[in-house]
Image (spheres, helix red, strand yellow):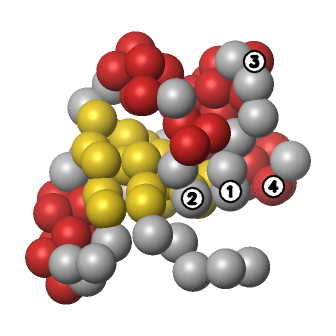
């Protein structure tokens, strides 16, 4: 896998701000909600990060983004493990 140069970060911005400060060559586009992220054309980015409280909103967001077309690699950052099982996120 090549190095990521551009990331769409969806959700909690605290870590996105820290990442952008530590890696100035990395383009981090932060969006608070899914509607704004969809408008970006996520396929044009190197990766997507979904920062969610638990697995349920992450699965919903991934399903909605996938329905719109191909996606770059997606990474999910959870505050706590919840239902459904985490194995569902590996699809």
The local crowd at label 1, few if under 14, some if 14 to 19, many if 20 or more residues have their Cα within 10 Å, is some
Q: In the orientation shown, which residue stands out farthest toward the right?
A: 91
Residue named by callout 2: 46
- Decide which of tag 2 and tag 3 comes sooner along the chain: 2
The residue shown at (30%, 58%) is 28
Q: In this view, does 6 lie to the left or right of 86?
A: left
Of tags 1 and 2, the one toward the viewer is 2
Residue 74, given in percent of the width and then of the height, sits at 63, 53
Label 2–label 4 contact, CB within 8 A: no
- Decide which of tag 2 and tag 4 comes sooner along the chain: 2
The local crowd at label 3, few if under 14, some if 14 to 19, many if 20 or more residues have their Cα within 10 Å, is few
Give the spatial CA distance, label 1 vs label 3: 15 Å
Give the spatial CA distance, label 4 vs label 3: 17 Å
- Decide which of tag 1 and tag 4 comes sooner along the chain: 1
Secondary structure category for the residue under label 3: helix
- Residue 49: in sight, yes or no? yes
- Decide which of tag 4 and tag 3 comes sooner along the chain: 3
Q: Quick check: 11 above or below 37?
A: below
Residue 19, given in percent of the width and then of the height, sits at 25, 73
Residue named by callout 4: 90
Give the spatial CA distance, label 2 vs label 4: 18 Å
Q: In which quarter of the image is residue 14?
A: bottom left
Secondary structure category for the residue under label 1: loop
Label 1–label 2 contact, CB within 8 A: yes
Q: In which quarter of the image is residue 52?
A: top left
Give the spatial CA distance, label 1 vs label 2: 7 Å
Residue named by callout 3: 67
Residue 73: which disc? 1
């Amino acid at each position: 896998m090549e190095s990521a140069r551009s990331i769409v970060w969806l959700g909690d911005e605290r870590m996105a701000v820290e990442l952008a400060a530590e890696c100035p060559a990395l383009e981090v586009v932060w969006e608070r909600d899914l509607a704004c992220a969809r408008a970006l054309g996520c396929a044009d980015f190197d990766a997507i990060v979904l920062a969610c409280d638990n697995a349920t909103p992450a699965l919903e967001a991934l399903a909605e983004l996938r329905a719109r077309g191909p996606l770059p690699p997606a990474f999910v950052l959870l505050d706590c493990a919840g239902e459904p099982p985490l194995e569902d996120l590996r699809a």
